[in-house]
Image (tube, rainbow, N blue to C red):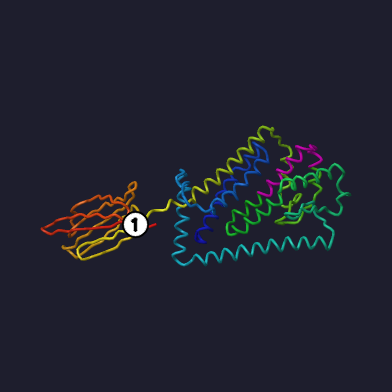
Amino acid sequence: MMASEALLRFLLASGAACTLVLLLRQAMRRLCGAGAAYLLWAAVPASALAALAPHGSGTLAAVPLPAPVAAAATQVTQAAASAARGGWDSVLFAAWLAGAVALAASMTWRQWSFQRSLRASAWQGGPLLLGAWRARLVLPQGFRRDYDPAERRLVLAHERVHAERGDLLANAACALLQCLAWCNPLIHLAAARFRLDQELSCDETVLRRHGQAGTYANAMLKTQLAAQGLPLACQWQAVHPLKERIMQLKSSVSPARRLGGKLLAAMLVAGSGLAAMAVHADPAASRHYNVYLEMGDSRPHLLVKEGEKSGVAIGEGADQWRANFVVAPAGSAIQVRTNVSHGGKDLSNFTLEVADNGTGSFKVSDAGKDFVVKMRVNEVH
């Protein structure tokens, strides 16, 4: 797979999945709870990975897809091929790599600078869970002074839910996708909404386990803004809209709707991955055939693609003989459909079936002149 084609496939799949989730997330949250909306975001990495996965047989290409999706996939393939023919493949890859490295370096610098600042002075922001594989709980200096015992229990329960669910690893995956798709503004908008849905889902889980919505809301109001834009952290408030989180505390969804929503989200995630595989599946490889001809004193050799028209001509003007061939498999045999013309006048159509590496011949007469064609055909393996 060409580098430019792989990038275009990745960008198309991740962008389409982001659009789908952005359109569905609020309705899903209202009907089935924040947990179902958060689960929807798994469609983005699922689609991106499916688009990059190797497809050898192309069996999924027969899946019927909406016309706009099929058209977009065709345009991507054509654009990638055009870029490669124009010599832009390596240029596009170098530009993408430079942007990805620059964004990754920026994220790494922000993360490192924040962690270094914690060693230099006490943290004054909000509670947060830091890291990826080894989570570290960071609490503000006045945590015990500013929060009463009930509020402290809920704050710690909130961070515990993040740790239990592996949200830090999800944030790391989100940061990776942002770096890989840095040139798509939609991925950065989606990343912000993903982090909000993560917090709303965590709030929902805490309230389901512990209740005390009023106390939980008070804890939110006391919390100052945490560090902005940390890629590897679950932050108590961070950049998430506080009003939306507090309003969400008032919503109530039945266990059956929560379960149904998560099942529906899982189906959408699986469906988006399969759709990406179907859109980007390589078509089944076409067969090619060697056609060796004897036409008078001429011995032309043609490499013919299955189902495509190829031809050869001998002579010029009114004395030109031309034979056009279409070669296709016919069970265990090879079928050759031939049209012969002389001086621009169609004479005869022939259909021959020969074994692989078999031979055949035919003769055509016009204006007292005979034209004999002998051929040997074998499939290219």
Question: Residue 85, how many percent across, how many down?
Answer: 44, 64
Q: Quadrant of residue 258?
A: top right
Q: Position of residue 186 (x, y in %)?
A: 59, 53
Q: Which residue lies at the image location 79% right of the left edge and 37% below the top edge? A: 211
Q: Residue at x 33, y 51 (%)?
A: 328
The answer to whether residue 316 is magenta is no
Task: Look at the numbered disc 1 and give the secondary structure of its residue.
Answer: strand
Q: Is residue 67 left or right of residue 191?
A: left
Tell me if mark 1 has few (under 14), some (14-19) or many (20+) residues whose alpha carbon lies within 10 angstroms of its own: many
Q: In which quadrant of the rendered view does residue 227 lie?
A: bottom right
| Relative depth, front residue between 321 and 130 | 321
Residue beneath disc 1:
289
Instruction: Read off the magenta span.
Output: 194-216
Instruction: Estimate the x, y position of residue 208 in percent, counting from the top left.
Output: 75, 37
Q: Is residue 211 magenta?
A: yes
- Label 1 is placed on what type of residue? Tyr
Left or right: residue 289 versus residue 275 is: left
Q: Quadrant of the C terminus?
A: bottom left
- Rendered image quadrant of residue 93: bottom right
